[in-house]
Amino acid sequence: MTLAPVFLGSLGRRRMASLFSLLAIILGVALGMAVQAIHEAALNEFGRGVRTLAGEADLRLVGPASGFDEALFEQILRHPDIAAATPIVEIDAKLAGHEPLLKVLGVDIFTLARVAPRLLPHSHERTERFATLAEDSIFLSAAAQQAYGVKMGDPLPVQAGSRTLTLRVAGDLPGVGDGQPLAVMDIAGAQLAFGRLGRLSRIDLIVADSSSPESLRRSVSATLPAGVQLEAPEAASEQSGNLTRAYRVNLAMLAAIALLTGAFLVFSAQALSVVKRRSEFAFLRALGLERTTLIRWLLAEGALVGLLGGLIGVALGYGLAWVALQALGGDLGA
């Protein structure tokens, strides 16, 4: 530590050069952090838009095959980071005379529209207005109707444990793609028919605008019961990733260029400083200072400037990102 005053004094004598190095580090780190922060905010906003258009939830609470207690739904609704939630019961039902299983979703119509509107059932008959709440009504996607050879009004025999339950096809699922064989019925009817009273398979969630899926994961994961986990819907995540790949590459390159430019400026300033201080270093060597010790002190000097500039740069970068998001918005176009 006896050499610390020597190198600190050298930094003080070279105020302009030291300040230039510090500013170069601050600007490089700040630009890189700002671009990265805006990048993440824009992708989160875009991903939310993709999920909204696709009728997908932001996140899902998924339990084991046997399901979990439906009391968790009330607990989740009170969480401040959750804007909306809908409970769902999933059953792989066996249809009489057909080999492939039919995925049946028991849904709550009153909460479904805001979270997963693509699953909303539709009846073409005005007299069937309240069919969505009937325990014996089921709604099939176009692919399911074609696969099982049924149409609206037909009976649908379904195996429920050791007994056969006859449901009535009351409509279709216009929001479900043609290639997806899927059925939807009222959650109370599904729980009663398939012996799932008081049990849920999953809870679909919409994250509040003031929060994000990542922060919700951190705040909720520790409080979940055993066997229940929080995950993102795969289809929407993959679609969002594909649509934003070009933007992500472009923004990542901008951040890398900002950091590389700052690094080049710092390297140039430090190299010039070392050349100008050769007489100082020669004097220290003449006094008996070893070469490795001199190199270590030079590295420590650069690390000190780099640490100070990096900390200020990170704070400035997040500040720039906040100002940009407030002024321009968080979407990719802005």
Image: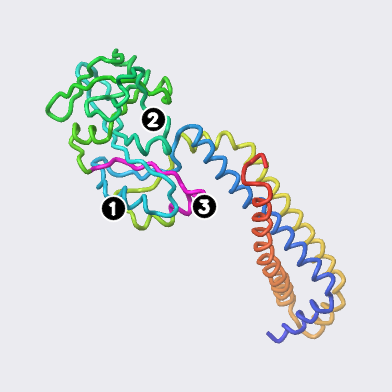
The residue lying at 85 percent from left, 71 percent from top is 16
Disc marking residue 226? 1
Q: What is the spatial separation of the Cα atoms under label 1 and label 3, in whole angstroms? A: 28 Å
- Around disc 2, counting alpha carbons within 10 Å, would you say few (fewer than 14), some (14 to 19), or many (20 or more)? many
The residue lying at 31 percent from left, 28 percent from top is 184
Q: Is residue 312 visible?
A: yes
* Mark 1 or mark 2, earlier in chain: 2
Residue denoted by label 2: 119
Identify which residue, 120 or 304, lies in the foreground.
120
Give, as a single range, the part of the protein colored magenta.
199-217
The image quadrant of residue 17 is bottom right
Residue denoted by label 3: 210
Q: 132 left or right of 59?
A: left
Q: What is the spatial separation of the Cα atoms under label 2 and label 3, in whole angstroms? A: 26 Å
Instruction: Give the answer, above or below, for where 119 lies relative to 269.
Output: above
The type of residue carrying mark 2 is: Leu
* Mark 1 or mark 3, earlier in chain: 3
Identify which residue, 83 or 181, lies in the foreground.
83
